[in-house]
Amino acid sequence: MTDRQTEARHAQAIGLELKSDAEILSLLATGQAEAAQCVVSAIPEIVRGANLAADALGKGGRLVYAAAGSSGLMALADALELPGTYGIAFDRIVVLLAGGMDALREMRGGPEDDATAAREAAEALALNENDCLIAVTASGQTLYPLAAIQVARAAGASTIGIANNAGARLFDLVDAAICLPTPAEVIAGSTRMGAGTAQKIALNMLSTLMAIRLGHVHDGYMVNVIADNEKLRGRACGIVAAIAGVDEAKAQSALAASAGAVKPAILIASGTSDLAEAEALLARHHGQLRPILTEMGGRY
């Protein structure tokens, strides 16, 4: 048996199947909580990764995720939510998943060892110095994301690695090495549990900080949200009203004038003459609302 932490047996797992249902679930819940807590130790590298990702998108580059198995699902969940939540263009987000999208229907272990497929997929992207690639692998040794990272590195792209074993091979290949030292899984080696939980949290933290630095968050509001359903249209109206300090009717009017775009609607509701002026101000300030509202003499 390997000495990797992600493969170690949990001390309380002996006789696991003999325990009561409540005892088993309590042990599983505790394991998840302990895994989540370990993310705190990785904050400095998550900060570094978030800034690399923000820099890439800010320069018009792409954010690419590469992963396999359960780690791939964590990466995919993070990637798919970014366009709707923060208004990042769909073509700026790419996911390289071992086994391709077929893996979402039938996940097999073999594709994670297919370094050739990873290299071909990464090379097809024609990566460059404006791009950033995030590789996610619990073991830190999985061939698919490692091969993708090597291609990205050779192309001059920024690289981020997320793994759950200290000293993982992945960390020697990346600009930001995010180690999530999760404790032994209650089910030995089942990294869909604690390791996956920690990865999900770390990815959420990284992409959220990235979005904040890109100006897509203001006072805790997602000001670049794509309001494409009734719930989100209501949220957009509330955001405009709260930040601009106007009533719902004026917020709705501003959103109509901006074709539903929240940032320019905030500026229109705050006093800009029209959409063209709002967009010009946003371009001048790189999408950051606060300096514009300060310049306009608002409360923010």
Image (tube, rainbow, N blue to C red):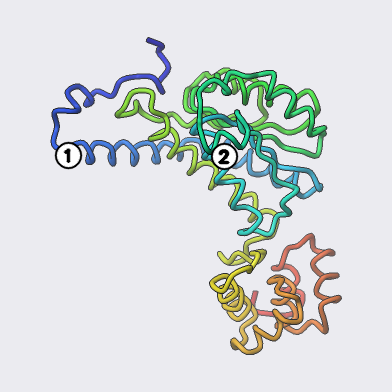
**In the figure, residue 19 lies in which quadrant?**
top left
**In this rendering, does residue 52 appear at all?**
no
281 sits to left or right of 237:
right
* Vertical position of residue 219 compared to residue 132: above or below: below
Q: Which mark is residue 75?
A: 2
Per the image, label 1 sits on a secondary structure element best described as: helix
Name the residue that disc number 1 marks.
21
Other-residue count near label 2 (Cα within 10 Å), few / some / many at <14 / 14–19 / ≥20: many
Q: Residue at x 52, y 40 (%)?
A: 74
224 sits to left or right of 282:
left
154 sits to left or right of 298:
right
Q: Residue at x 77, y 38 (%)?
A: 131
Q: Residue at x 63, y 89 (%)?
A: 249
Residue 225 in the image: x percent, y percent? 64, 64
For badge 1, the amino acid type reads Asp
Q: Residue at x 79, y 67 (%)?
A: 282
Residue 270 in the image: x percent, y percent? 71, 82
